[in-house]
Image (spheres, rainbow, N blue to C red):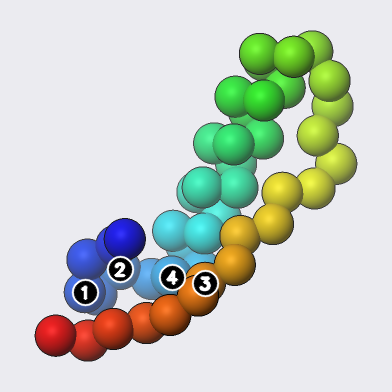
Amino acid sequence: VVEYGVNIKVASNSIIESVKYNVENATGFIVKQVNVHVESVRVD
């Protein structure tokens, strides 16, 4: 969940890079692809 005003694409790219980095460092495997799916958007 991200706060109102946060750029979803930027947040998604940050998540992708973090997951890729951590998986590669934990396993030693090279990660080719990480997918992030936005399921919904809610404005309160």
Where residue 24 sits, quadrant-wise, is: top right
* Cα separation between marks 2 and 3: 13 Å
Few, some or many C-alpha atoms within 10 Å of disc 2 (few <14, some 14-19, many ≥20)? Answer: few
Query: Label 1 belongs to which residue?
Result: 4
- Mark 3 vs mark 4: which is more N-terminal? 4
Identified at 84% across, 27% down, the residue is: 30
Residue 35 higher or lower than 6, as above or below: above
* Cα separation between marks 2 and 1: 6 Å
Identified at 22% across, 66% down, the residue is: 3
Numbered disc in front, either 2 or 3:
3
What element does badge 2 sit on?
loop
The amino acid pointed to by label 4 is Ile
Query: Label 4 belongs to which residue?
Result: 8
The amino acid pointed to by label 3 is Val
Report x, y in % for residue 26: 66, 13
Query: Label 2 belongs to which residue?
Result: 6
Asked if disc 2 and disc 1 are in contact, CB closer than 8 Å, the reply is yes
* Cα separation between marks 4 and 2: 6 Å
The amino acid pointed to by label 1 is Tyr
Is 10 in front, or is 27? 27
- Mark 2 vs mark 3: which is more N-terminal? 2
Q: How many marks?
A: 4
Q: Quadrant of the C terminus?
A: bottom left
Report x, y in % for residue 27: 74, 14
Identified at 60% across, 24% down, the residue is: 22
What element does badge 1 sit on?
loop
What element does badge 4 sit on?
helix
Few, some or many C-alpha atoms within 10 Å of disc 4 (few <14, some 14-19, many ≥20)? Answer: some
Query: Label 3 belongs to which residue?
Result: 38
